[in-house]
Amino acid sequence: MSKDEQKRQSAEAALRFVEDGMIVGVGTGSTVAYFIDGLARMRDRIKGTVSSSEQSTQRLRAHGIDVLDLNAVGTLQLYVDGADECDPNRCLIKGGGGALTREKIIAQVSHTFVCIIDDAKQVDVLGRFPLPVEVIPMARSLVAHEIGLLGGQPVWREGLVTDNGNWILDVHGMRIADPTGLERTLNQIPGVVTVGLFAQRPADIVIVDGVRRD
């Protein structure tokens, strides 16, 4: 089975969690793009969506799907998104596409977070994929220094500005045995907007190559 087919199957499986009248939280990335395409088939059954990125917003609107302001919606029943890595406890690394802050906000207000991935994203311990950290631009050097003291090797993702107007440091060389603790520690560094660890609020359901793994 090709990688694209694996992604498509996971996206199709996530559509089963969409119920009539829902406002659906929608993430970002290549697997989510398949989910958005599938959601277009049922756009008349849902109230609308909340999007985690300008990229996803454009794709949703191109399909005629309403995109709503989260402040006007409040809480969500369902959020569907991908991940760059997933451990056995459903803790995630996200942010390879640069949308980690909005993704984390939507995950926090959602009752059920369904993560759709292909098999290559499953790991025993997080950290093989560089950990994205969104930072306020003036704090880039400060945050990089503090991460270095923690044993990480931060690399500025030059040329990328997030939808929030910030920069991203990708942290290499960390074996993240305690993702919840590291998430808490990194979030306390002045200038950090958010961290691409989804451990304090992990996924509720993980779908791998179209198969649910709990």
Image (cartoon, rainbow, N blue to C red):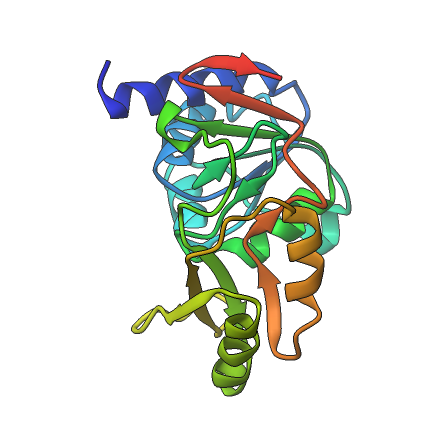
Q: In the rendered image of this protein, does residue 45 appear above or below residue 47?
A: above
Residue at position x 56%, y 16% from top? 213
The residue nearer to you, when weighing 26 against 126, is 126
Can you see residue 13?
Answer: yes
What is the quadrant of residue 110 in the picture? top right
Q: Quadrant of residue 190?
A: bottom right
**In the drawing, does residue 180 fall left or right of residue 60?**
right
Q: Position of residue 60 (x, y in %)?
A: 44, 40
- Please state the total of marks drawn on the protein image: 0
**Residue at screen point 69% across, 48% down:** 180
**Quadrant of the drawing holding the C terminus:** top right
Where residue 31 sits: x, y (%)?
Answer: 38, 32
Of residues 185 and 22, the one nearer the viewer is 185
Residue farthest toward the left in the current orientation of the protein: 2
| Looking at the image, residue 174 lies above or below residue 137 | above
Q: Relative to 98, is 104 on the left or the right?
A: right
Give the camera-side residue of 98 and 213. Answer: 213
Taking the spot 43% from the left edge, 23% from the top edge, the residue there is 11
Left or right for 156, reference 51: left
Measured as percent of width and height from the top left, residue 197 is found at 58, 50
Which quadrant holds the N terminus? top left
Task: State the image coordinates of residue 44 (x, y, percent, origin top left).
Answer: 54, 24
> Residue 199, located in which quarter of the rendered image?
top right
In the rendered view, does 95 fall on the left or right side of 18?
A: left
Position above or below: 13 against 189: above
Asked whether the viewer can see residue 162, the reply is no
For residue 24, above or below residue 209? below
